[in-house]
Amino acid sequence: MAELRDFDPTDDADAVADMARREVAKAALRVVKSRRYHKANPRDQFEGMMHGIMTGALGTIVMTTIPGSESEVRAILLKHLPYYFDRALEIGGRQALGEFQ
């Protein structure tokens, strides 16, 4: 996965990615609806969601990587993080930020 490409719902990797994205969104929605989330102030809500979702997502990625490939996987994640962020903005109806400065 060195290079990014347009989404293709017939591609196995893209279909799995879409399924994973939807499941993460469902889990996040359950948290947002929880009493504990509403008890927290906005800063703690944001920080808790960011830390929890990122750690959970990256932990899942780590569990599915080949041992010894961690450095390569981290490099790919860091390289493509602006792309992932822009796709999330677009899915949410917001404007993509474009190239990372």
Image (tube, helix red, strand yellow):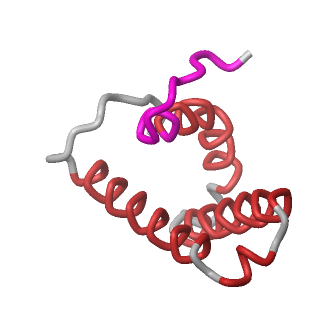
x and y percentages locating residue 9 in the rendered image: 19, 46
Residue for point 68% across, 38% down: 78
Displayed quadrant of residue 79: top right
Residue lying at the far left of the rendered structure:
10
- In the image shown, does 19 or 29 lie closer to the viewer? 29
Please check the rendered image and state whether residue 23 is part of the magenta-colored stretch, yes or no. Answer: no
> Which of 11/95 is in front?
95
Q: Position of residue 86 (x, y in %)?
A: 53, 31
Q: Give the residue at x 30% y 29%.
A: 6
**88 sits to left or right of 9:** right
The foreground one among 100 and 45 is 45
Residue 17, percent across and down? 37, 54
Count of residue discs: 0
Q: Is residue 89 magenta?
A: yes
Dominant secondary structure (helix, strand or loop) of the stretch shown in magenta = loop
The residue sitting at 79% across, 78% down in the picture is 39
Instruction: Look at the image and tell me in which quarter the N terminus lies.
Output: top left
What is the x, y in percent for residue 48? 77, 66
Is 8 above or below relative to 50? above
Residue 6 versus residue 91 in the image, above or below: above
Q: Does 41 sit left or right of 65 as displayed?
A: right
Q: Is residue 59 above or below residue 97?
A: below
- Answer left or right for 26 relative to 101: left
Question: Which residues are drawn in magenta?
Answer: 88-100
Residue drawn 67% across the image and 59% down it: 54
Quarter of the rendering occupied by the C terminus: top right
Which of the 4 image quarters holds residue 19? bottom left
